[in-house]
Image (cartoon, rainbow, N blue to C red):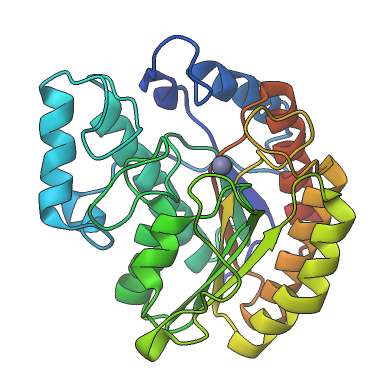
Amino acid sequence: MTMKSKLTGIHYDSCYEAHDTGPGHPESAERYRVLRAALEELPVEEFPRLPRRTATVAEVLLAHEAHYHDLVYRDVVSCSDVLRTGDTNICPESYEVALEASGAVLAAVDAVMRGEVLRAFCAVRPPGHHATRARGMGFCIFNHVAIAANYLRKQHGLKRIAIVDWDVHHGNGTEEIFYEEPEVFYLSLHEAGIYPFTGRAENRGAGKGVVGALNLPLKHASGGTTALAAWDEFAGPALDGFKPEFVLISAGFDARVRDPLGGLEWEDETFEGLTERVCGVAEKWAGGKVVASLEGGYWPPGLASAAVACVREMAKSSG
Ligand SMILES: [Zn+2]
């Protein structure tokens, strides 16, 4: 029997910088370069590097409709500047980069399931959590976390997957994909009253997925203490009730202080506190298994410091 690793793997790759969103766009290659430089500083003995891999079309279709996949492909090859379904800028490389991003998260899931690492952080772009089954929007093309959740069900036979989304924006795409799905629990902390204007507290899932979602909208400028208190009062108990076998994180860092798109004013310590709590839930129910996928975060130095704080806490919270 092989020893299971307790390490936290990380994934980053300059290939994601080929997704060009145009001058002045907040979801820029530059924000990624700053993050990548910070992750490169982490010692490889403690944070093994995880490889890239390209998602197959069949894997994209785990969370998206075929006509939407084809639409993305057509928009990209016809050199459109914007995806026709919404506010997502694209360039001729965007389709392939989006496949790399989804594939990297699946590779990380496989590495965790095989016990090569206990947890993983995937620094990928474009982000994914606004993409619905049939619509890219909000800088997102394919929903990597949603694809990974269905991959865990199909490929690894898991029956209870939790998705924790702490991006400052509500992950309307992920929520929609799993709204009636009892095997996937979607939990979001986000700023109330901003894009995409979804994620109200009364939205708890429907059909068989009733109580399959938990939305914790937080007031503008409410700060990290409020977020951690909301976690302790509502999110932790809900996840303990669900007993996930695997936890995926939609790890956006745009709730951080100084972010130009978010106003929750969280500190790096807030992300550490959330990471510690998510990992605690995973230790209790999921053998510790957590994979985080980067979403937003638009002030590059803040993105880098908060993401590194999260990655270090993932490693600290193991076992
Ligand atoms: Zn966001």
Residue 75 % position (x, y): 15, 29
- In the rendered structure, the answer to whether residue 18 lies left or right of residue 258 reads left
Relative vertical location of residue 44 with respect to residue 184 in this rendering, above or below: above
Q: Residue furthest top?
A: 23
- In the rendered structure, the answer to whether residue 279 lies left or right of residue 187 reads right
Q: Residue at x 58, y 45 (%)?
A: 194
- In the rendered structure, the answer to whether residue 5 lies left or right of residue 73 reads right
Residue 112 % position (x, y): 53, 62
Q: Residue at x 42, y 46 (%)?
A: 128
Residue 291 % position (x, y): 56, 57
Residue 131 % position (x, y): 35, 49
Q: Residue at x 36, y 88 (%)?
A: 207
Quarter of the rendering occupied by the N terminus: bottom right
Question: Quadrant location of residue 53?
Answer: top left
Q: Between 11 and 199, which is closer to the camera in this rendering? A: 199
Residue 33 in view, yes or no = yes
- In the rendered structure, the answer to whether residue 95 lies left or right of residue 34 reads left
Quarter of the rendering occupied by the C terminus: bottom right
Q: Between 58 and 234, which is closer to the camera in this rendering? A: 234
Residue 114 in view, yes or no = no
Q: Between 244 and 127, which is closer to the camera in this rendering? A: 127
Relative vertical location of residue 62 with respect to residue 296 in this rendering, above or below: below
Q: Residue at x 53, y 23 (%)?
A: 26
> What is the tally of numbered marks visible in this picture?
0
